[in-house]
Image (spheres, rainbow, N blue to C red):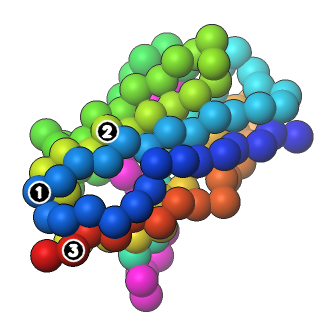
Amino acid sequence: QVDLVESGGGLVQAGGSLRLSCAASGNIYSINTMGWYRQAPGKQRELVATITSGGSINYKDSGKGRFTISRENAKNTVYLQMNSLKPEDTGVYYCYLAQGVRLMAYWGQGTQVTISS
């Protein structure tokens, strides 16, 4: 069993910044992928960014240049620094971890990010 606990969401004005954190606990493999997905109102959940335990990073185009994903493997924690936030970045941000040969996926409970114009 794996638990993911997010923190750092909130309400900020456009152009502002937020830093999301997600701590994983439980049966964590040394090789895994962690990341963030976003679900905007009325839309499907979509990728924001992922990072492997080896440091390979993937960003959705909308976040490139504004968002930075990082992780601390020793703490099983992933971060998402979001700068120059836009109203379209609004949504519930979910932490994600995938591991194992079958890429078992785990999700956090989500944290609300609201960007006002």
Q: Which residues are magenta?
A: 41-52
Q: Secondary structure at mark 2?
A: strand
Distance between mark 3 and mark 1 Cα atoms: 9 Å
The residue where tag 1 is placed is 15
Q: Position of residue 5 (x, y in %)?
A: 66, 45
Ranked by sequence position, the earlier of labels 2 and 3 is 2
Would you call the spot at circle 1 few (<14 residues within 10 Å), some (14-19), or many (20 or more)? some
Q: Which mark is residue 81?
A: 2
Identified at 40% across, 70% down, the residue is 91
Q: Which residue is mark 3?
A: 116
Left or right position of 76 against 64: right
Check disc 3: other Cα within 10 Å, few if <14, some if 14-19, many if 20+. Answer: some
| Residue placed most toward the observer, 98 or 63 | 63
Q: Earlier in the sequence, mark 3 or mark 1?
A: 1
Snapshot quadrant of residue 11 = bottom left
Q: Quadrant of the C terminus?
A: bottom left
Tell me the amino acid under the disc marked 3: Ser
Furthest toward the right, the residue is: 1
The span from disc 2 to disc 1 (Cα, nearest Å) is: 13 Å
Does residue 104 appear in the picture of this structure?
Answer: yes
Q: Is residue 47 left or right of residue 31?
A: left
Q: In this rendering, is residue 34 above or below 110? A: above
Residue 104: x %, y % from top left: 74, 43
Image coordinates of residue 57 in percent, x first then y, are 36, 29
Q: Residue at 75% of width from left, 21% of height from top? A: 29
Residue 73 higher or lower than 103, as above or below: above
Q: Amino acid at mark 2?
A: Gln
Q: Residue at x 26, y 62 (%)?
A: 12
